[in-house]
Amino acid sequence: MRRPEKLAEALKEEIAEVVGYELDDPRVATATVTDVTVSDDLRDAKVYVLIHGSEAEISAALKALKHASIFVRQQVTMNLSLRYAPHLHFVRDTAEENASKVTQILSGLDIKGENEERNDSDGLNESES
């Protein structure tokens, strides 16, 4: 595993801890750190967060996280004993939202006809045996 990937994994665990337990801001109560990517030069880190709530609540939580990024960075630096910690950029993680939309679309499709065709073909194969 390359160094940025190792740092990203350590950062993910530590940032999740700081955001979950050390930030007292109620706007970030529903924020969950899902992933962290670190640039090759180790200067910047994108922190992907999943936030539950309305669009207004999500934007307020992202604003609060961006405001608290300096504190989070300081805590991470101390807890991981880093000489230099990357700048943290909090980004909304939309992967799970997109997955739920796809699931809704797929569940809305009518696949009943396809299942009936499979059952009919199974019945024909059994009678031929």
Image: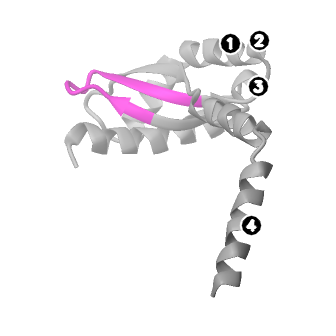
The answer to whether residue 47 is above or below residue 125 is above
Q: Nearer the viewer, mark 4 or mark 1?
A: 4
Decide which of tag 4 and tag 1 comes sooner along the chain.
1
Residue 119's tag is 4
The residue drawn where x is 56% and y is 42% is: 17
Q: Secondary structure at mark 1?
A: helix
Residue picked out by circle 3: 26
In percent of width and height, residue 82 lies at 29, 36
Q: What's the amino acid at mark 3?
A: Pro
Residue picked out by circle 1: 59
The residue drawn where x is 55% and y is 14% is: 66
Q: What's the amino acid at mark 4?
A: Asn
Q: How is the image coloured?
A: one colour
Q: Secondary structure at mark 3?
A: helix
In percent of width and height, residue 35 lies at 47, 37
- Cα distance, mark 1 to mark 3? 13 Å
The segment highlighted magenta reads 36-49
Q: Which residue is farthest front?
A: 128
Do the numbered discs 1 and 3 sit on residues whose CB atoms are within 8 Å?
Answer: no
Do the numbered discs 4 and 3 sit on residues whose CB atoms are within 8 Å?
Answer: no
Decide which of tag 2 and tag 4 comes sooner along the chain.
2
What crowding class fits label 4: few (fewer than 14 Cα within 10 Å), some (14-19), or many (20 or more)? few
